[in-house]
Amino acid sequence: MNWMKQFLKKLHRSWYIVVVSLFFVLFYPFLYYFSRNRSRYKALNHFRRFYALCSSCFSGLAFNYKAETKIDWNRTYIICANHASNLDIPATTLLIQNNFAYMGKDDLLDNPITGLFFKTIDIPLNRESRISSFKAFKKAEEYLQHGISLMIFPEGKIADDYPPKLHPFKNGPFRLAISQNIPIIPVTIKDAWKKMWDDGTKYGSSPGICHICVHAPVETSGLSLADADALRDKIYTIIHADLEQYES
């Protein structure tokens, strides 16, 4: 029976890829049009959410959000979440209700789907290049100053561990939050990896409900850059404790 389960998971992953690709082709004219001008980015995000909703629903995937407190989406935030699955992208896309952009690794520029967003609204980052990092964080500052929230996975990548564990966070998002006086929303994506770990290539994927906890915003007012490490550790502890509790 184990081989049958693995076959079905591989079959579901193939179906997921077909669905994601199909809806991208269907929505491409709208996504392309709204990606051409920064003044249209808010509309682009509306279509990005609709795209994430359609592709998830037709793949048999749903996201259950539990918020510790009501989020005021009229404010600008940096949203930080753990990252162990490609499903973290639609999960956070559907979560964020204001104008936003992702900051992520620059190899997403080469993906035919994510490339459209990372060549326009989103911010590609090559941490091996000081020039790339400088430009990315300058653009991030500009976005925040114009009321565009940022979605960042502070681990920097999906690690090779299976089952996944939470890896140390990079400092950049927390220095950025302090310098721009922007609150951080910690988000725990508890079990998306059980439906699809990484991109699903190795273990396939399966339909089901992914559970996400949206923690109360952590304010940065009154903090200095000297507090960046402490802020990083605080956000890490919030997410790590929630993951530990869920697994136990």
Image (cartoon, helix red, strand yellow):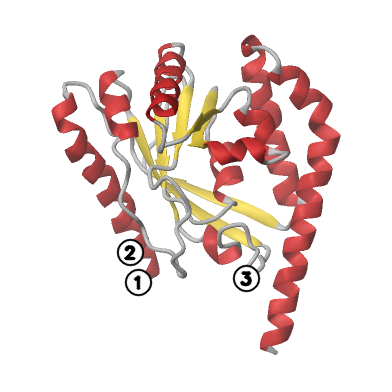
Amino acid type, callout 1: Ser
Contact check, label 2 and label 1, Cβ < 8 Å: yes
The answer to which of 234 and 171 lies nearer the viewer is 171
In the image, 5: left or right of 87? right
In the image, 158: left or right of 221? right
Q: Is residue 101 above or below residue 238?
A: above
Q: Residues within 10 Å of mark 3 (few under 14, many from 20)?
A: some
Quadrant where the image shows the N terminus: bottom right
Quadrant housing residue 225:
top left
Residue at 41% from the left image edge and 32% from the top image edge: 129
In this figure, which residue is indicated by the disc labeled 1? 248
Q: Total number of numbered labels?
A: 3
Disc on the earlier residue, 1 or 3: 3
Quadrant housing residue 127:
top left
Residue at 47% from the left image edge and 69% from the top image edge: 162
> Which mark identifies residue 245?
2
Q: What secondary structure is marked by label 1?
A: loop
Q: Position of residue 190 (x, y in %)?
A: 45, 58
Q: CA distance from mark 2 to mark 1?
A: 5 Å
Quadrant where the image shows the C terminus: bottom left
In this figure, which residue is indicated by the disc labeled 3? 203
Amino acid type, callout 3: Tyr
Q: Position of residue 85 (x, y in %)?
A: 54, 55
Q: Residues within 10 Å of mark 2 (few under 14, many from 20)?
A: few
> Which mark identifies residue 119?
none
Judge depth for marks 3 and 2 and give the one in front: 3
Q: Is residue 49 above or below residue 208?
A: above
